[in-house]
Amino acid sequence: MTRESSLTLDRGLALLQAVADAEGASATVTDLARVVGTSRAAVYRLLVPLTERGLVWREGSRVRLGAGVLRLAEQMLPQLRASARPVLRALADGVGATAHLSVAEGDQVHVVAVAEPTLTTFHVAYRLGSRHAASRGAVGKALSLRPRGRGWAAATGDPQPGVHGVAAPVRGIVGVRAALGVVSLVALDNATVGARLVEAASTLAEALRD
């Protein structure tokens, strides 16, 4: 691979990551050019192969992830679950609440891995495979956080009444929007739990990049 080809590949991956990290459902070409550090014309050129492979979808100047990313995500789920298992176990027992890894699929959030605490009398039973709207709960809030803002989000009574949740986005996994979270029947120390989730999310992202 030539140096020019390597640079183009790097920019294409950076663009795909920028689309994945965009706030809301889509990003503008102008926003993407600013994040990637290139011109609008270069962004349009880079979008062509990504669009042809179904990794992004473009309507005018707005861009969002395409269905091709979901197919890639499904293929990496076993690796994602295996890497998340020890992280979730440490969270569940350390916080004393049910820990989970959730992945955004379109306008839904899909729970792909769960660990329940071993030393509690009562805890939330979170079913593997559960889904809820991507705009709901602590996970929904976490997925919409700005990259340079606060690293965690909390919610009470959403998406289920009587449940307290804290979540943090897992950043740096190209094409995948995911979050680590904990849910509890009692109020949590959000700041302390949030900081722990941010650290755990970073550990998971590093494990997936190795």
Image: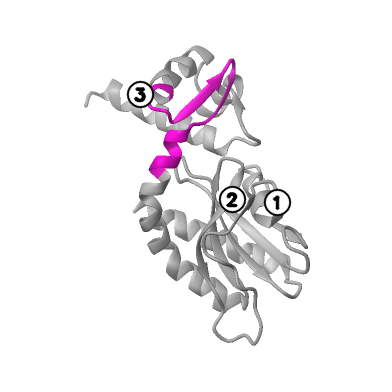
From this viewpoint, is residue 103 visible?
yes
Query: Residue 177: where, in percent of width, then height?
Result: 53, 45
Give the distance between the C-alpha atoms of the residues marked 3 and 2, in whole angstroms.
Answer: 32 Å
Secondary structure type for disc 2: strand
Residue 184 picture location, percent across and down: 68, 72
Which quadrant is the N terminus positioned in? top left
Residue 147: horizontal and vertical position, in percent?
Answer: 61, 43
On screen, residue 128 versus residue 72, left or right, reads: right
Rendering colour mode: one colour
- Which numbered mark, 3 or 2, is in the foreground of this view? 2
Q: Is residue 202 left or right of residue 53?
A: right
Query: Does 33 appear in magenta?
Result: no
Q: Please tell me the numbered disc located at residue 80.
A: none
First in sequence: mark 1 vs mark 3: 3
Residue 202 on image: x %, y %: 50, 56
Q: Are marks 2 and 1 in contact (CB under 8 Å)?
A: yes
Residue at label 3?
8
Residue drawn at (43%, 31%), measured in percent from left and top? 55
Of the pair 175 and 171, the residue shown nearer to us = 175
Mark closest to the chain's N terminus, 3 or 2: 3
Q: Quadrant of residue 146?
A: top right
Whether 173 is drawn above or below 11: the answer is below
Q: Amino acid at mark 2?
A: Val
Magenta residues?
Answer: 51-72
Q: Are marks 3 and 2 in contact (CB under 8 Å)?
A: no
Please, what is the three-letter code of the amino acid marked with disc 1?
Answer: Arg
Compared to residue 171, the image places residue 45 above or below, namely: above
Amino acid residing under circle 3: Thr
Residue at point 72%, 74% (across, down) = 185
Q: Residue at x 56, y 74 (%)?
A: 92
The residue at which mark 2 appears reads as 109
Residue topped by disc 1: 136
